[in-house]
Image (cartoon, rainbow, N blue to C red):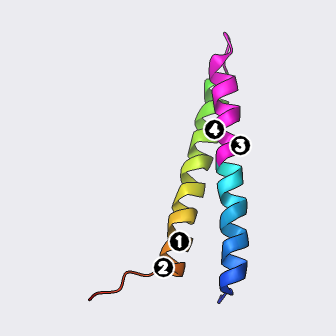
Amino acid sequence: MNLSEEDICRHLEALRLEHRDLDDVIARLDAETVANQLQIQRLKKRKLVLKDEIVRLEAQMYPDIIA
């Protein structure tokens, strides 16, 4: 699937926003006295998946050029 650079940028921004939102949710859940550890684990796993996707898309947009 070949996306345009504009499509990739929009998708990257959406992923980054979701990643930041998960940070906030995890912090709030972690601050609760009775935190649901399973839910926190799932959110952290989702955050890692998002980060991997962000890195993959960034590498697609800005490939390493061997000089």
**Residue at label 4?**
23
- Mark 1 touching mark 2, by CB under 8 A? yes
**Tag 3–tag 4 contact (CB < 8 Å):** yes
- Three-letter amino acid code of the residue under disc 4: Asp
- As helix, strand or loop, the secondary structure at mark 1 comes to helix
Q: Amino acid at mark 1?
A: Glu
Q: Residue furthest top?
A: 33
Residue 66: give x, y in percent of width and height.
Answer: 29, 87
Task: Please give the residue where the numbered disc 2 appears in the rendered image.
Answer: 62
**Which quadrant of the structure image shows residue 50?**
bottom right
x and y, in percent, of residue 47 in the image: 59, 48
**Which residue corresponds to mark 1?**
58
Q: Is residue 18 above or below residue 62?
A: above
- 67 over 21 or under it: above or below: below
Q: Which residues are magenta?
A: 20-35
**Mark-to-mark CA distance, 4 and 2:** 26 Å
Predominant SS along the magenta part? helix
**Number of the label disc, if any, that sits on residue 21:** 3
How packed mark 2 is, by other alpha carbons closer than 10 Å (few <14, some 14-19, many 20 or more), is few
Q: Amino acid at mark 2?
A: Tyr
In the image, residue 11 lies in the stretch drawn in magenta: no
Q: Residues within 10 Å of mark 3 (few under 14, many from 20)?
A: few
Residue drawn 63% across and 40% down? 42
User: CA gap, disc 3 to disc 2?
Assistant: 25 Å
In which quadrant of the rendered image does the N terminus lie?
bottom right
Asked which secondary structure carries label 3, the reply is helix
Q: Nearer the viewer, mark 3 or mark 2?
A: 2
Residue type marked 3? Asp
